[in-house]
Image (tube, rainbow, N blue to C red):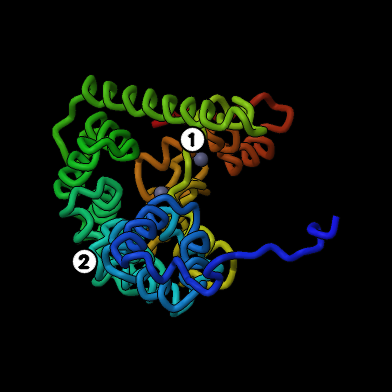
Amino acid sequence: MTHLNKKPRFENLNVNLFDDLHDDLVISILRKLSSSAFSPSDFLTVLFTCKRLNRLGLDPLVLSRAGTHALAVTAENWSDSAHKFLRRCVNAGNIDACYALGMIRFYCLQNPVSGASLMARAAIKSHATALYSLSVVQFNGSSGTKSDKNLRAGVALCARSAYLGNVDAVRELGHCLQDGYGVPRDVSEGRRLLIQANARELACSLRSYLSLKSGNETLTDLFCGGVPVQEIHPVNRFLKDWFGSGRVILAEGLRMCSHGGCGRPETRSHEFRRCSVCGKVNYCSRGCQALDWRAKHKMECAPLDLWVAAAEIGDGDGEAVEIENHVAR
Ligand SMILES: [Zn+2]
Ligand SMILES: [Zn+2]
């Protein structure tokens, strides 16, 4: 039994096999990691392991492939280093990073010129979400005045984004066509697009359910009020947390989009459209209004002032105040 107490012997114990790997091979592995990481820390912790991984991990070939989740810096962890990391990814030609940093600069860092320019860089490379976000900027004349609204440019950007498969853009375009907003009115085509957007949303939710069915999620977790729950883009979550955490206070008179999955703030007073019935919620777009109406606002929306007035006026004398039906868009 004495052999059990012996220490195992390894030949060539001092040979570091990692050093023998060619840079190209390590870069190729890091590219795969950066594109599939579930969070920035998944990727960045590897870079802290040693100087070589740090150097190769920051190679433009690796950073250009960093995926949406690897770039998903949170508002809570925002710092100069996080900014520098996103900037490096932008310089490496990563279009997801162009979009993410563009949105952050436009809405959070009060640098709308640089933000819009970065979003445009992504849009030129057919980044569907960047095209949609730029359409919202054009529809609202964001960072400018009311006269800077450009509905036709908004529709053009939205149409391009919808063509590339962005569901929010398909929905927005459907509402524009239904209302004749920035485009000649075409109710049947508008309806067709809205049905298409709903069908795609449903398909996404069912796909998520099927991929998560080994977890604890149930089918009802993926629906809210009978409406599929959309996955929130990390940049929208960043915006929501940036202004919602209380760390940064919006300038007086400015409001956030009331749709929970959006996070866009107004860039000037009364920029967003308001619910015409209760006047208590504001939306950056028709799409956000429609989504929030279906998800929750239809349960909350009530012209309370009118009801209070009705109770005071009509107390016992049968007088009623007619309340206009709110038609969900
Ligand atoms: Zn919104
Ligand atoms: Zn309302």
- Look at the picture and state if 276 lies above or below 21: above
User: Residue at (56%, 70%) from the top-left corner?
Assistant: 13
Query: Looking at the rendering, in which quadrant would you find the C terminus?
Result: top left
Residue 125, percent from left and from top: 17, 53
Q: Which mark is residue 117?
A: 2
Residue 166, percent from left and from top: 30, 39
- Report the amino acid beneath label 1: Trp
Crowd class of label 2 (few under 14; some 14 to 19; many from 20; radius 10 Å)? some
Residue 34, percent from left and from top: 40, 57
- Report the amino acid beneath label 2: Ser
Residue 299 appears in the rendering: yes
Mark 2 vs ligand 1: CB below 8 Å:
no
User: Residue at (32%, 65%) from the top-left corner?
Assistant: 22
Q: Earlier in the sequence, mark 1 or mark 2?
A: 2
Dot 1 falls on a residue whose secondary structure is helix
The answer to which image quadrant residue 306 occupies is: top right
